Amino acid sequence: MKKRIKKIVIKVGSSLVANYKTGLPKTNWINSFINDLSFVIKKKIKIIIVSSGAIAIGRKRIGFLKKKLNLDEQQAAASVGQIYLINNYKKAFIKKKVEISQVLLTLEDTIKKEKKINAKKTLNKLIEKNIIPIINENDTVATDEIKFGDNDRLSARVAEIIKADLLILLSDVSGLYNKDPKKNKKAELIREVKKIDKSVIKASSFTNNYFARGGMKTKIMAAKIATNAGCGMIIVNGNSKNIIQRIFKGEEGTYFYPKKRKKNN
């Protein structure tokens, strides 16, 4: 990461913020994450957070205990869980005297020209005022046809819209491996990706647990979107201590190099 970072988008995976067994937000992790973010805030870097976890938190509270939920069950769980999730973020940020906002987006909002422009104006105005938007997919109104289905690609579209310099994907894995690290002890972390080729696609073939809707495949899809828009992307383990600070020191994760940003982008 040689270029100066002015704007970042951070995507938070559901396994980091939600306790799947209890259905409660992981308050300790959220507080630790916000403390770590202070490093970035002091540098006057503009921040947008895309957070998963609403469905994982909400499903337990309304009794949806089966592994796979249909669309209306996901939407109901999201509407309940989102309240608990955003409240926990609010409590943590208040301690740092930082204002936040809640923004719910659908696929349409990031690809249809008029809606995309409106989203861009709103997000830029918020970060201009040093307010940190916390974004999630609007699961309650999105249908199968207009859903991302994961927040990896949503965060990449957000990074594209605001012309972010860096997209950080906080996950429960340390980056992209040449083999599935959960099954193969000899798996090696790939530290840099300059081109997303067949070998990278093959390395992304393993998936996460059933509560999370993404996986490594959607992270590579996100990398394509972000890097094509001139935004670098890094996948890191969000459970590592002071992970945000360590990213800026070049110590962690898999970094995807951006393509040169077009002048009209």
Image (spheres, rainbow, N blue to C red):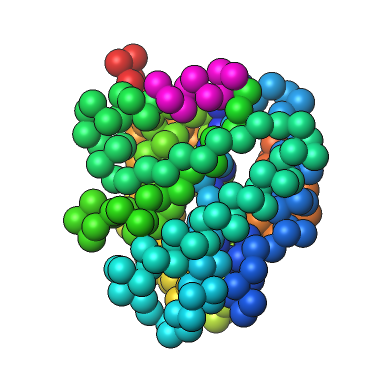
134 up-or-down from 208: above or below: above
171 up-or-down from 4: above or below: below
Range covered by the magenta-colored residues: 121-129
User: Which residue is located at x 23 percent, y 51 percent?
Assistant: 146
Q: Is 123 within the magenta?
A: yes
- Expressed as whole percent of the image width and height from the top left, the position of residue 41 reads 71, 29
Is 56 on the left or on the right of 149, as rendered? right
Which residue is outermost to the top? 263
User: Which residue is located at x 31 percent, y 74 percent?
Assistant: 70
Is 158 on the left or on the right of 35, as rendered? left
User: Which residue is located at x 71 percent, y 32 percent?
Assistant: 98
Number of numbered discs on residues = 0
Q: Hey, which quadrant is residue 1 in on the image? A: top right
User: Which residue is located at x 55 percent, y 36 percent?
Assistant: 101
- Expressed as whole percent of the image width and height from the top left, the position of residue 187 reads 57, 71
Q: Is 137 within the magenta?
A: no
**Dividing the image into 4 quarters, which one contains the C terminus?**
top left
